[in-house]
Amino acid sequence: MALKAKSKKTGKINKKSKIIAGVCVLLAVVLGVTGILLSFYGNETACYDFGKDRARGYDLSEHNGKIDWQALKDEVDFVFIRVGYRGYGTGKICTDKCAKDNLKNAQKAGIPFGVYFYSQAVDEKEAEEEARFVIKTVAMYKPNLPVVIDYEYPIDENGDNTGRMWEASLSKAECTKTIKAFCEKIEKFGYISGVYASSYLYDNDINTKKLPKSTVVWVADYNESVSTSSPYHIWQYSRTGKSDSIESKYVDLNYWYSKKQKG
């Protein structure tokens, strides 16, 4: 999921618990994981509170290999698990080989977890197809953090952008509509949606103001500070983290802020 080059470019809440709050009214729903509070400030984005100003987490996939989940529990406040991806050449939707084990083990270890899908959707129809795949995959695992669309362009061996989504040359409006379609489908099934992208993509290809108000914004930026002008909640600040609990050489590192950060 880590972004390797500069690109061109949730938890499930019962329907009765999805609260539309009035301006300046704070309503909160305690999720099924100790220490996490989901709040809605007026019509603003849902804010997860882990009991600290900045929570620490990893995003994990089959590329991370074997994981010692009990040891991992002492390292992180949350994780995001990849459940699948769309091939950037074929367009075929595939399941992450470790998705089921990772979902089951995160749940068993009691680690708050959300999920993400690596998208290559080139239109709203494909985005909704990806969302339906995710919903079906996670149904029995009950993630308590957002369901995220991972929106990025693949990089070839020369370090150049490639893949069907890149080649589609979508406009900013088209990119935004595609992401919005995924998020709206996810939220229709009672989950909080999220979007992951680079600072560059947020500034050039995605209008976050057009997304559902509750959508969590997750930005990848490996500089000393985040450069996007879009407000965000989660910052993936490194793709070269290390953990003795994880088989892979590196793991992506993320901070989740208790308050929405200004871009």
Image (tube, rainbow, N blue to C red):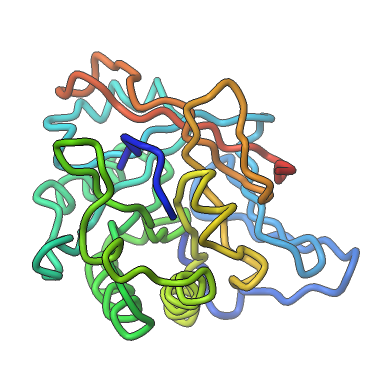
Q: Quadrant of the N terminus?
A: top left
Q: Who's the residue at 27% across and 39% down the image?
A: 60
Residue 226 image offset from top left, x and y in percent: 61, 33
Q: Who's the residue at 35% across and 27% down the image?
A: 239
Is residue 148 shown above or below 258?
A: below
Total marks in image: 0
- Asked which quadrant contains residue 54, the reply is top right
Q: Who's the residue at 21% across and 23% down the image?
A: 246
Q: Which residue lies furthest to the right in this view?
A: 24
Residue 16 image offset from top left, x and y in percent: 60, 79
Q: Nearer the viewer, residue 245 or 43?
A: 43
**In the drawing, does residue 23 fall left or right of residue 102?**
right
Is residue 165 shown above or below 188?
A: above
Q: Nearer the viewer, residue 232 or 100?
A: 232
Q: Which of 245 and 179 is in front in this view?
A: 179
- Asked which quadrant contains residue 157, the reply is top left
Residue 258 image offset from top left, x and y in percent: 68, 39
Is residue 23 shown above or below 238?
A: below
Residue 182 image offset from top left, x and y in percent: 41, 74
- Asked which quadrant contains residue 65, the reply is top left
Q: In which quarter of the image is the C terminus?
A: top right
